[in-house]
Image (cartoon, rainbow, N blue to C red):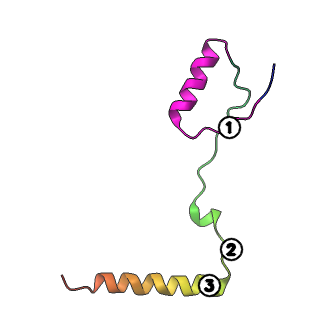
């Protein structure tokens, strides 16, 4: 027997693995459940503060231009 690590990129692939396990062809050793982490928590502190401020100013300016456009 050989153990391999598999990355699941699609829910259909996980279903296939479950089907193979039901047929006793493979055994899933670990079913990891990843918690949903907020993006703000995941990327908090990743940008230097000066770049983050510059980016925030750009986003604010872009939103203002979008809201004030003449259509």
Q: Among all residues in the image, which is located at the extreme left?
A: 71
In the picture shown, does residue 27 fall above or below 34? above
In the picture shown, does residue 31 fall above or below 56? above
The answer to whether residue 57 is left or right of residue 50 is left
- Residue sitting at x 68%, y 32%: 31
Q: Toward which corner of the image does residue 62 lie, by quadrant?
A: bottom left
Magenta span? 4-25
Q: Toward which corner of the image does residue 54 lie, by quadrant?
A: bottom right
Tell me the distance, in whole angstroms, between the alpha carbons under discs 3 and 2. 11 Å
Residue indicated by mark 3: 51
Dividing the image into 4 quarters, which one contains the N terminus? top right
Residue indicated by mark 1: 32
Question: For the residue carrying disc 3, how many other residues have a C-alpha within 10 Å: few (<14), some (14-19), or many (20+)?
Answer: few
Give the mark, 3 or 1, whose residue is nearer the N terminus: 1
- Give the foreground label among 3 and 1: 3
On whether residue 21 falls in the magenta region, the answer is yes
Question: For the residue carrying disc 2, how many other residues have a C-alpha within 10 Å: few (<14), some (14-19), or many (20+)?
Answer: few
State the image coordinates of residue 67 (x, y, percent, origin top left): 30, 82
In the picture shown, does residue 17 fall above or below 67? above
State the image coordinates of residue 38 (x, y, percent, origin top left): 57, 59
Looking at the picture, tell me which residue is in the foreground, 25 or 63: 25
Contact, CB < 8 Å: mark 3 with mark 2? no
Give the mark, 3 or 2, whose residue is nearer the N terminus: 2
Secondary structure at numbered mark 2 = loop
The answer to whether residue 2 is left or right of residue 49 is right
Secondary structure at numbered mark 3 = helix
Secondary structure at numbered mark 1 = loop
State the image coordinates of residue 37 (x, y, percent, origin top left): 60, 55
Numbered tag placed on residue 45 in the rendering: 2
Q: Toward which corner of the image does residue 34 lie, by quadrant?
A: top right
């Amino acid at each position: 027997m050989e153990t391999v690590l598999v990355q699941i990129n699609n829910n259909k692939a996980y279903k296939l693995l479950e089907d193979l396990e039901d047929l006793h062809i493979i055994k899933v050793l670990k079913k990891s459940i990843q918690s949903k982490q907020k993006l703000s928590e995941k990327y908090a502190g990743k940008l230097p503060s000066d770049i983050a401020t510059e980016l925030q100013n750009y986003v604010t300016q872009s939103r203002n231009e979008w809201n004030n456009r003449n259509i």
